[in-house]
Amino acid sequence: MSYSFGGVLKELRGKMTQEKLAKSLNEKYGTGINKGMISKWENGKEEPRIDTARYLADYFNVSLDYLLGIENKKTDKVEEKSPLKTIAAHLEGKEITEDKMKDVLKYIDFIFSKEFDEK
């Protein structure tokens, strides 16, 4: 895969048609994108305006750096970390037995009960 904007956009679009992508973007963001614009972007004939690139990054849930071909590692766009995502990241790849999950839940309850005791 080419790490140019056009190559990345084409890869992200996958089997979705250019027409479907344009329609989806227009419905979600109120843009005036059409199939021809997407074709020009993917073929390197033109590049989108920065606000349109932001919409595309948001739509595909990737960072703007990835979309623009600056980063070649696909990561989710930068978001405020939620506690659930943080906890899930710590558990990823670990074998979670029923007993271990009960312990995790007990510990969470303990932390929150401690917080209320301090107030």
Image (cartoon, helix red, strand yellow):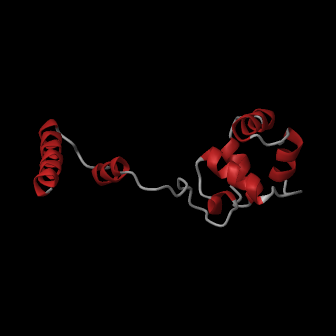
**Quadrant location, the N terminus:** bottom right
Give the vertical position of 117 relative to 71 (above or below): above
In the image, 80 versus 64, the foreground residue is: 80
Where is residue 74, by image quadrant?
bottom right
Q: Residue visible at 72% across and 50% down?
A: 9
In the image, 117 versus 6, the foreground residue is: 117
Where is residue 105, by image quadrant?
top left
Q: Residue visible at 80% across and 57% down?
A: 49
- Residue 27, position as x, y percentages in the image: 73, 34
Q: Residue furthest bottom?
A: 70
- Residue 54, position as x, y percentages in the image: 69, 54
Q: Residue visible at 61% across and 62% down?
A: 72
Give the vertical position of 116 relative to 29 (above or below): below
- How many marks do you count on the picture? 0
In the image, 45 versus 117, the foreground residue is: 117
Say left or right for 17 vs 103. right
**Quadrant location, the C terminus:** bottom left
Say left or right for 67 vs 6. left
- Residue 76, position as x, y percentages in the image: 53, 53
